[in-house]
């Protein structure tokens, strides 16, 4: 292993500029003659707009223009994935306006844009706009939204507020398994809605070049090419060659910056109208009200088992809250990223899943770190632990009994996916060792002597990422391919620029991808540059989400590097007067087997651009290659998370005192970056399980709309993590990589809640919902005590 | 934030004058509440009078029986003061746990008391310790100073100059954090004073900080304190804690404060 190649914990190249304030984020960019936009948002969850008077605002100091939905007649913000109902009919897909068209559907919905010389002036003028609202009753809970008589978010465009009523599997076949079952274990649970909270709020700058007729959008996006496609082709009807989208440094996304948002279309469209650049930057409270939220499932599940605890069948019924509009990937999250994961790491032969996607008067819901897989894992791992308890089995033994064995791969699940690799026993064993599982009773007794309730919880999981094989997702309703592109440009002096369609917004691509190049070409990291985030500079890109950057984007880079090495070998063969088949390339040097002939990579690069002595008959000058890579399958990271908590029964406070994560993420390129990704995922998983409560009141007001009320995980909420990897290689890509970005957030929430319930078992508490806040736990303890007293 | 006129007088007398001359003035101490409120456009004073130039309002002194803290002394200064740590360690610890490092370096004791946020920490210490609030016009007992949620006995043009804390025999503050904001969901400050035990509760009451003479009597009688005497209907309820949970926490925190004071 070289010091800068695959497997080396190289310090992140990008951190110097990030840590010293030299990053270049969207809000850092300023254009000559720039104006500022303020978006007037709905204060109501559901209302008709009977009229908007902008007269006073238009003549306010500094105001350049005011536009409402009446002015901005453009296409619907598109949804990227069509899902069909059980009966084969297409889902309901109501119009999604950039600026409200006669009706607002959630608090924060865009009503008007005010463009002024300064942001303050725009905000002042917004107060002069008079909107005549006729308030309507609102509904925020998905179960209530499909009850008879519920307010209709989209009126006739979505009867019963139903987006789709979808199923996977044969319900009758699964019912037959239940008839033979010795035991049936059932669970009802919610997967709590989350607010993503990237450190950098969203921002966008629209610019129109009056000379060329070209538009440029700078935006906080995880995938600028996707934004160009969605906004250009569907909303504003701008062809690719007249629309450039730049996503410069981006400060975190976690999914929330995948989607095409109204503000991007508004500033781009309006820049064409006012013929000046327009900058919009979200305030944090706007982020709460306009960044797509995550999760929000209500589920019921039944598990059928034989007398020995072997799983026979699983039925899952889920109501997924879509919010007020369909965000870009919203529809695939509770279906193809959730239902398809409900086999988990188990051999359950028959599975049926029904998912109803439901409109409500809330912020749209879409993928958030893990997207569908955390929801599936939470449901399964709560259910399996409950089954162990109900059957009087050991919670580890019941898992082992049902694991897909390591020699069973490739393994076809009953819910469409084919897992290529994994070893769930190995990750389990290592996690149990690291967490000192067997010594837990001693720790529990010691905690009890201090008046604390100590509990331990486990979760064993698999997820599907490396998104995704285009043909497969196309057959499932995706309206795009999910390949990736790469361009390797070798410069005349032998330094290299990589142009990748993956986008880095905290993941460390500039380092990991450079390590791939260093390993392959044998050149130092400082001679390598990773370029991303600009549709005018990068050939194409599907962006970063679903832990796909390395497994798809990295593979594209490897493919292009392979082409470079091929061509360079031919040039080297010419220089060494050898046959190309005899040339070997290692550690940056071309050699001819059995001779002392040698030429280094830099010499070959120079020869390609100064081709005086060159095989012109067979080769073109230059050394630059493109590649597109479309994966053969998803990748399947898996592992085991073990959490240990101590609960103060007097206050209900939970302290996480141990968190062990053993993950199989495939081959690890940079162990330090992988560990960092896992730490971040665990923090978000613990946040979901214990802290983060996104609450709406009955009027549809977001009552947890700031950090005063929405609890983000802080360092003192987290223990020292024990994170380790246990590797099986991905069987269908050249690097053997799987993905590490989401596993922390996928595996941990059920481990935490199982630990909380283990701790509360002795005081009679059977169930708790996420987030398990101190108040909730205290109330559960009180309720159990009342129940015990009554018995 | 709306436009306003900014003043930075160099003495308390000049500050009082500037207040008198303004239409709708606000005094800026550390700004940890006022500035966010103005940024959210929830406050729109015509004039902001900063006390940052009034150096005579900064400083800590101790004579063994009384600790005097200038109104513009930051939380960080109180937390790290050897005098406070020695005389009233519970007060230093309380100051060291307010907000985060940035807040503690800007926020001031006078600003906190004048604002009287119902979930702030300092009001509990001030009331329990029976401190005296010294202003440009008079001296007020803590019992008379706090009049309700975000309400004090201060007049419009009256400025706190210092707080005098009598040194107790023992004291402790037990705080249950709001998990999100880290303000007090319930905070109980217990002081063993020459006049007997004093208990002040912050975070819980609809009227802001309050004393519980019932709990004080329990402690005086040598009993373990409990919150059975607290009337739930006087307590706050929000998404983080019902009134019942707050009432329960008052008992737990009172017990912990008494135990910690020794």
Image: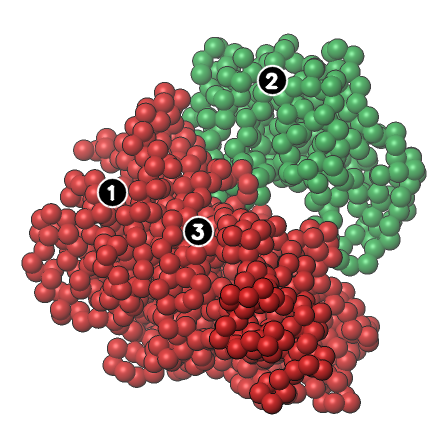
The answer to whether residue A456 is above or below residue A120 is above
Residue B151 visible in this rendered orientation of the protein: no
In this view, the residue in front, A751 or A509, is: A509
Label 1 Cα crowd, 10 Å radius (few <14 / some 14-19 / many 20+): some
Q: Is residue A491 left or right of residue A749?
A: right
- Residue hosting label 2: B171
Residue A744 numbered tag: 3
At which x and y percent is residue A427? Answer: 33, 47
Residue drawn at (60%, 17%), measured in percent from left and top?
B171
Distance from the alpha carbon under mark 3 to that under mark 2: 43 Å
**Could you say which quadrant of the image residue B88 lies in?**
top right
The answer to whether residue A198 is above or below residue A262 is above
Kindly indicate whether the residue at mark 2 contacts the one at mark 3 (C-beta within 8 angstroms): no
Residue B107 visible in this rendered orientation of the protein: yes
* Display colour for chain A: red
At which x and y percent is residue B11? Answer: 91, 35
Pinpoint the chain carrying mark 3.
A
Residue drawn at (71%, 56%), measured in percent from left and top?
A17
Q: Is residue A327 left or right of residue B159?
A: left
The answer to whether residue A53 is above or below residue B149 is below
Q: Is residue B248 left or right of residue A115?
A: left
- Residue hosting label 1: A396
At which x and y percent is residue B3? Answer: 82, 58
Residue drawn at (63%, 66%), measured in percent from left and top?
A600
Pinpoint the chain carrying mark 1.
A
Q: How is the image coloured?
A: by chain
């Amino acid at each position: 292993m070289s010091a800068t190649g695959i497997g080396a914990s190289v310090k992140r190249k990008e951190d110097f500029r990030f840590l010293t304030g030299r990053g270049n984020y969207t809000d850092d960019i300023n254009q000559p003659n720039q104006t500022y936009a303020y978006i007037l948002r709905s204060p109501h969850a559901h209302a008709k707009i009977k009229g908007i008077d902008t007269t006073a605002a238009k003549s306010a100091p500094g105001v350049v223009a005011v536009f409402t939905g009446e002015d901005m007649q453009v296409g619907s913000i598109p949804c990227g994935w069509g899902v069909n109902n059980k009966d084969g009919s297409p889902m309901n897909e109501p119009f999604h306006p950039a600026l409200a068209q006669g009706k607002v559907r959630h608090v924060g919905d865009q009503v008007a844009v005010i463009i002024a010389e300064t942001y303050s002036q725009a905000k002042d003028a917004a107060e002069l706009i008079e909107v005549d609202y006729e308030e309507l009753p609102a509904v925020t809970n998905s179960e209530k939204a499909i009850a008879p008589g519920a307010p209709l978010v989209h009126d006739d465009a979505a009867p019963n507020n139903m987006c789709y009523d979808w199923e996977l599997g044969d319900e009758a076949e699964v019912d037959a398994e239940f008839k033979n079952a010795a035991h049936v274990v059932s669970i009802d649970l919610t997967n709590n809605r989350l607010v993503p909270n990237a450190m950098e709020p969203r921002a966008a700058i629209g610019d129109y070049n009056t000379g060329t007729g070209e538009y440029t959008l700078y935006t906080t996006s995880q995938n600028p090419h996707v934004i160009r496609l969605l906004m250009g082709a569907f909303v504003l009807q701008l062809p690719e060659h007249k629309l450039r989208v730049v996503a410069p440094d981006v400060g975190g996304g976690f999914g929330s910056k995948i989607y095409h948002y109204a503000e991007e279309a508004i500033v781009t469209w309006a820049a064409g109208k006012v013929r000046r650049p327009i900058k919009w930057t979200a305030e944090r409270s706007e982020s709460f009200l306009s960044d797509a939220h995550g999760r929000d499932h209500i589920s019921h599940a039944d598990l059928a088992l034989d007398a020995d605890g072997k799983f026979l069948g699983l039925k899952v019924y889920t109501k997924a809250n879509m919010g007020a509009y369909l965000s870009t990937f919203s529809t695939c999250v509770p279906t193809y990223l959730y239902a398809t994961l409900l086999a988990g790491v188990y051999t359950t032969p028959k599975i049926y899943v029904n998912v109803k996607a439901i409109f409500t008067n809330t912020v749209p819901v879409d993928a958030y770190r893990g997207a569908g897989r955390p929801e599936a894992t939470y449901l399964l791992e709560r259910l399996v632990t409950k089954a162990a308890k109900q059957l009087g089995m050991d919670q580890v033994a019941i898992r082992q009994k049902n694991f897909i064995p390591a020699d069973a791969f490739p393994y076809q699940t009953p819910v469409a996916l084919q897992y290529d690799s994994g070893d769930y026993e190995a990750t389990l064993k290592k996690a149990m060792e690291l967490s000192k599982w067997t010594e837990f009773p001693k720790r529990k007794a010691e905690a009890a002597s201090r008046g604390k309730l100590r509990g331990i919880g486990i979760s064993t999981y698999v997820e599907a990422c490396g998104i995704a094989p285009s043909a497969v997702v196309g057959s499932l309703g995706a309206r795009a391919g999910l390949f990736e592109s790469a361009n390797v440009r070798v410069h005349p002096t032998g330094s290299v620029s990589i142009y990748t369609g993956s986008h880095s917004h905290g993941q460390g691509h500039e380092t990991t991808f450079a390590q791939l190049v260093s390993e392959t070409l044998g050149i130092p990291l400082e001679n390598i540059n990773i370029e991303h985030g600009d549709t005018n500079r990068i050939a194409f890109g599907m962006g970063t989400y679903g832990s796909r950057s390395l497994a798809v984007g990295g593979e594209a880079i490897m493919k292009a590097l392979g082409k470079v090495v091929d061509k360079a070998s031919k040039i080297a063969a010419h220089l060494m007067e050898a046959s190309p088949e005899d040339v070997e390339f290692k550690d940056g040097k071309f050699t001819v087997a059995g001779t002392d002939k040698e030429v280094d990579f830099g010499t070959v690069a120079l020869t390609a651009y100064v081709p005086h002595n060159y095989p012109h008959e067979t080769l073109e000058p230059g050394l630059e290659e493109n590649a597109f890579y479309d994966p053969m399958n998803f990748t399947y990271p898996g592992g085991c998370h073990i959490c240990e908590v101590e609960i103060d029964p007097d206050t209900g406070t939970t302290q996480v005192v141990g968190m062990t994560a053993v993950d199989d993420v495939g081959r690890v390129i940079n162990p330090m970056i992988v560990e960092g990704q896992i730490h971040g995922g665990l923090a978000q998983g613990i946040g979901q399980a214990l802290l983060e409560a996104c609450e709406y009141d009955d009027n549809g007001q977001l009552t947890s709309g700031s950090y005063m009320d929405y609890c983000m995980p802080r360092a003192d909420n987290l223990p020292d993590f024990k994170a380790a990897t246990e590797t099986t290689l991905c069987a269908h890509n050249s690097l053997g990589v799987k993905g590490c970005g989401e596993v922390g957030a996928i595996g941990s929430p059920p481990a935490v809640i199982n630990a909380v319930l283990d701790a509360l078992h002795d005081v009679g508490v059977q169930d708790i919902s996420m987030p398990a806040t101190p108040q909730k736990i205290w109330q559960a303890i009180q309720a159990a005590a009342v129940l015990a007293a009554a018995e | 934030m709306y436009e306003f006129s900014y003043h930075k007088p160099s003495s308390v007398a000049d500050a009082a004058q500037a207040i008198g001359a303004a239409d709708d003035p606000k005094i800026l101490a550390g700004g940890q509440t006022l500035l966010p409120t103005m940024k959210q456009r929830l406050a729109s004073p015509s004039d902001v009078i900063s006390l940052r130039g009034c150096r005579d309002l900064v400083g800590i002194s101790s004579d063994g029986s009384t600790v005097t803290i200038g109104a513009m002394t930051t939380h960080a200064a109180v937390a790290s003061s050897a005098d406070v740590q020695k005389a009233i360690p519970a007060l230093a610890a309380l100051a060291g746990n307010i907000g985060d490092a940035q807040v503690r370096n800007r926020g001031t004791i006078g600003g906190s008391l004048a604002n009287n946020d119902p979930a702030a920490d300092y009001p509990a210490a001030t009331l329990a310790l029976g401190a005296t609030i010294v202003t440009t016009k008079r001296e007020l007992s803590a019992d008379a100073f706090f009049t309700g949620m975000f309400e004090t006995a201060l007049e419009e043009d009256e400025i706190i100059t210092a707080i005098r804390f009598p040194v107790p025999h023992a004291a402790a503050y037990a705080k249950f954090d709001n998990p999100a904001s880290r303000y007090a969901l319930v905070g109980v400050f217990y002081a063993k004073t020459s006049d007997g035990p004093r208990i002040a509760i912050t975070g819980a009451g609809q009227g802001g900080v309050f004393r519980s003479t019932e709990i004080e009597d329990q402690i005086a009688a040598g009993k373990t304190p409990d919150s059975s005497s607290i009337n739930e209907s006087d307590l706050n309820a929000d998404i983080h804690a019902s009134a019942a949970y707050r009432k329960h926490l008052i008992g737990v925190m009172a017990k912990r404060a008494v135990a910690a004071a020794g």
